[in-house]
Each structure stands twice: as C-alpha cells, then as structure tokens.
Amino acid sequence: METKLLDLKGKEVGKTALPEVLFSAKPDVHFIHEVVKYYLANKHRGTAATKTRSEVSGGGKKPWKQKGTGRARQGSTRSPIWRKGGVVFGPQPRSFRQYLPVQKLRLALVEALSARAADGAVLVMNDLALSEPKTSSLNDLRKSLNAKSVLFVTDKMDKNFRTASRNVADFGWCLAANLNAYEAMRNEKIVFTAGGLKALAASLKEAK
C-alpha cells in the first residue's frame, strides 16, 4: 500500500510505501468500537457526586412537634422530600476504568490504521523541522490538508514545529510510541513523519 509523501508546505513530492506490519489488517468494526469505548471509559473521570441527607448541612432541629399539628410528622428539613434536602440514589464518585489485554490494543491500532489508510487519511512527511517557530510558516500546510483535525505522529518532536502549531486549533501531535486506536480514528487525517512510521513499525515487530 502506498500514500502521498508531502513537504512542509503540504505539496505532494512523491509516493511512499506503508509498512505491511501496520497497514495490512482487515478492520473489524465491532472490535475497533470495543477498543474505542475502552479508551473513552478510561478518560471518564467519574467525579460526579450528590449529597445524601446525612451530608447536607443543617436540619438538626425537628421542624414541628410530632403530634397535634395536623401535618405529617417530619424529623428533619434535610429529608429528600424537602426543598434543599438530600438526594436519593444520586451519583457518587466511582471508577469507570476498563481492562483490555495489550495484544488487543496493538491489534486494534493496526486495524484502525489500516482502515484510515484505505480511506486515504494517512499521509507521510519526511520530517517536521521548521526553520523558525512561527505559525505563519504552517499556513500553506494547513490549507493543503484542509481537515477539521490533523494528528502528526513522529519519533521526536521538533521544537519549532511544536511552538508554531500551538495556535492552530486543528493540529495535534503525539509520539509514535503513544499512538492508539482512539486517536487514529478520531482525527480526520494522520500525518506520519518518516521516522515516526519507522519507529512505530519497529515497536510492533518487537512486540510480536
């Protein structure tokens, strides 16, 4: 499988082969969906919380005497049936973390990359080395990619590129070692550097 080779201005300067170890799998939609849910669940902070009647301040005094008023007996103004009372069965802090074997995560990454490459969303650049850390130097690249979100995958980040891309809302980056199926699926285009592509392929070969 081949894809476009771009320069830093986004112009096509040739074609380059994609490693079979990364782009030769047949995607399983249900499997990729399972893995994406795993990453989303692990991003879930689970900090939502409500107060029970025992946690709401106040309410220590009985609203009125037990008998003789003609009203229903009440023991506290922090009862759940009262305004400003506690909450019954409300959310409490908990963990949403899931577990998947590392082998599954690696396979999902390969399937996700294969699917994106088949859609023409995977591109390659020689490197991300900019001569100066200015956002204006990325204007041509931004226009040529014309995508809502672009992920740059590299083996080592160029300091000038990182600084210049801070003001570009649709540009993100990660090291090849940190790429996962969720990031591969959620970005409209994935741009590998030659070094990043080589590093990722080597790491998967070692894992096997």
Image: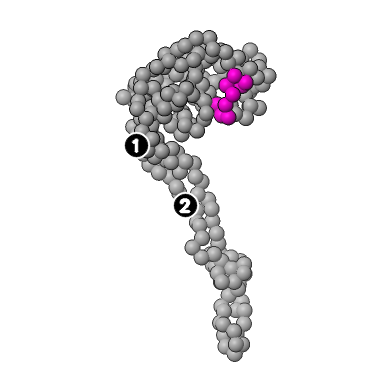
The quadrant of the rendering that contains the N terminus is: top left
Nearer the observer, 174 or 188:
188
Report the side of 13 relative to 197 (left or right): right
Using the image, tell me which numbered label, if any, was put on residue 101: 1
Q: SS for tag 1?
A: loop
Place of residue 142 in the rendered image (x, y in percent of width and height, measured from the top left): 61, 21
Q: Earlier in the sequence, mark 2 or mark 1?
A: 2
The amino acid type, in three-letter code, at marker 2 is Arg
Q: Specify the segment rendered in magenta.
A: 142-150
Residue sticking out furthest to the top:
13
Place of residue 64 in the rendered image (x, y in percent of width and height, measured from the top left): 62, 82
Using the image, tell me which numbered label, if any, was put on residue 19: none
Q: In which quarter of the image is residue 140?
A: top right
Place of residue 178 in the rendered image (x, y in percent of width and height, measured from the top left): 46, 28
User: Which residue shows up at 62% across the image and 67% down it?
Assistant: 84
Place of residue 171 in the rendered image (x, y in percent of width and height, measured from the top left): 58, 26
Nearer the observer, 103 or 56:
103
Q: In which quarter of the image is residue 108?
A: top left
Q: SS for tag 2?
A: loop
Residue 171 lies in the magenta-colored region? no
Q: Mark 2 points at which residue?
A: 94
> Visible in this render: residue 185?
yes
Q: In which quarter of the image is residue 204?
A: top left
Is the residue 143 above or below the residue 182 in the image?
above
> Visible in this render: residue 176?
no
User: Which residue shows up at 58% across the image and 75% down it?
Assistant: 76
The amino acid type, in three-letter code, at marker 1 is Pro
Residue 143 lies in the magenta-colored region? yes
